[in-house]
Amino acid sequence: MERKFGKVTLNVTDQPQQEFILTQSITTIGSAETNDIPIKRAKVARAHARIECTEAGCTIFDLESSQGTKVNNQAVQKVNLANGDIINLGEAVLIFEAVTEADASDATVLDEAVFADDSSEKAPEPEAASVTKRDTLVELQAGGNKTPFFCVVGRYADVALLQTLAHHIGPDQPFYALQPPQSADMSPQFTDIDALVAHYADQIIGKQAKGPYFVGGYNVGGLVAFEMAQQLRAGGRDVAQVVLIDTPYLVNNPLPYWGYRSATTVKQTGDKLFEPLHSWVQSNIAPKVTGPLQEMRSTLQSRWTQQVERVVERLEEDYQTMQETLGDEGYETTVQLLQRYEPKSYSGQATLFLAEESLVRYSGALWGWHNVVANGLKVVTVPGSYINILKEPHVQTLAKQLAACLVS
């Protein structure tokens, strides 16, 4: 049975009330249909907010939405949720209910000590630094009789995207995500890529004792997966396939990390400097220009509907992805450890999935990966961009092509 972290009740004017049980570690909320909680016609951004849940509780994050996120009438960027909290996203109202003891008893994986009788002997609590905030191995889809697929994420936010990919591959394909572990005090867990890769390999072997193994990664996570395949093979284990999903070819390249750090610094500085101005604009300017801008957009859409929608959606997706990435410690950890990484020659099988609109196509990825995959690299082009390759409708094509690769 699924673990229950809590429940969200959605209320939108002129729409029936809806209830959503929080069973995933990450739940996305927005107007796009690809969200776990889609909200239409309520001034909600395509990707408005996300709720992250662990055994310790649930936290809501605003994703730099234009309307903002409020909890109990207070604007927030990130806040821990308590039972009964009222969440406002645009004109939508959500009520959060924490998991109760009765509800939690239905879940099979909750720690029994949480609900143990007070008179029973309790295990000593671990020190704060050893408490895991994020587990390394995330089960996205269990069951089925096929060989599991283990996919390394580029960002923590990618775990939710991979859930959609796992769904479209089919229920008979076990699917697991691998992400950098994170302690409660946010201290770094690894200082080099070899240590992180060895940790990932141990997690895989703990779940699947013998090969053949199917490993892969999304974007920069593919570089980590490639090195993981090297280590597994060096240990005498059979790796049937390495899957690189829109993965750039980076060799001793510190630019992604330093670019990330610079962009993060600029964003944080800008947030502090312009927060007072932002509040004033939202109160005094936004109400006056929202109507004319919406009218202009409607006029353009009536003449060039598909073209306008495509441009607007692409701009929203690009901006949203940038904001998510700049606040994603998983991405920072990965690119930091990859600064001095140099892929070595690989004699196994590898498949590179390239998105038609991705910049990875023009970054030397084809030349680089062809050089290190000695027995020939299979390249598959799929529709979409780096941003939406894991979203509807493009994820369906990727899932179909990926399923064909995962054959022992």
Image: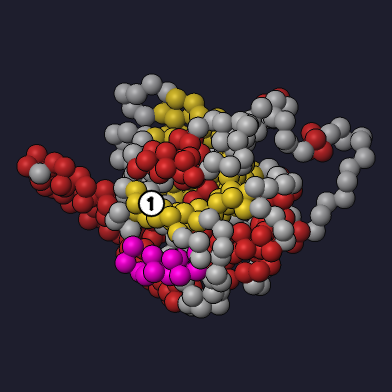
Q: Is residue 321 above or below residue 13?
A: below
Q: Report crowding for label 1: few under 14, some 14 to 19, many 20 or more residues within 10 A (C-alpha).
A: some
Q: Residue at x 38, y 48 (%)?
A: 389
Q: Quadrant of the C terminus?
A: top right
Q: Between residues 158 and 61, which one lies in front from this camera angle?
A: 158
Disc 1 residue type?
Val
In this image, 294 relative to 113: left or right? left
Q: Quadrant of the N terminus?
A: top right
Number of numbered discs overlaid on the protein picture: 1
Does the magenta run of residues contain 369? yes
Dominant secondary-structure state across the stretch colored magenta:
helix
Q: Between residues 374 and 92, which one lies in front from this camera angle?
A: 374
In the rendered image, the residue lying farthest to the front is 375
In this image, 88 relative to 4: left or right? left
User: How far from the left and from the top, in percent, is residue 156?
Assistant: 53, 54
Q: Residue at x 51, y 78 (%)?
A: 252
In the rendered image, the residue lying farthest to the top is 16
Kindly identify which residue carries mark 1: 380
Q: Is residue 359 above or below residue 388?
A: below
Q: Residue at x 29, y 56 (%)?
A: 357
Q: Is residue 123 above or below residue 260?
A: above
User: How far from the left and from the top, in percent, is residue 86?
Assistant: 49, 37
Q: Would you identify the image quadrant in which residue 17 lies?
A: top left
Stretch in magenta = 361-373
* Res. 322 visible in picture: yes
User: How far from the left and from the top, in percent, is residue 39?
Assistant: 37, 34
The secondary structure type at the circle numbered 1 is strand
Does the magenta run of residues contain 59? no
Q: Would you identify the image quadrant in which residue 188 lies?
A: bottom right
User: How far from the left and from the top, in percent, is residue 9?
Assistant: 49, 29
In this image, 5 relative to 367: left or right? right
* Res. 282 visible in picture: no
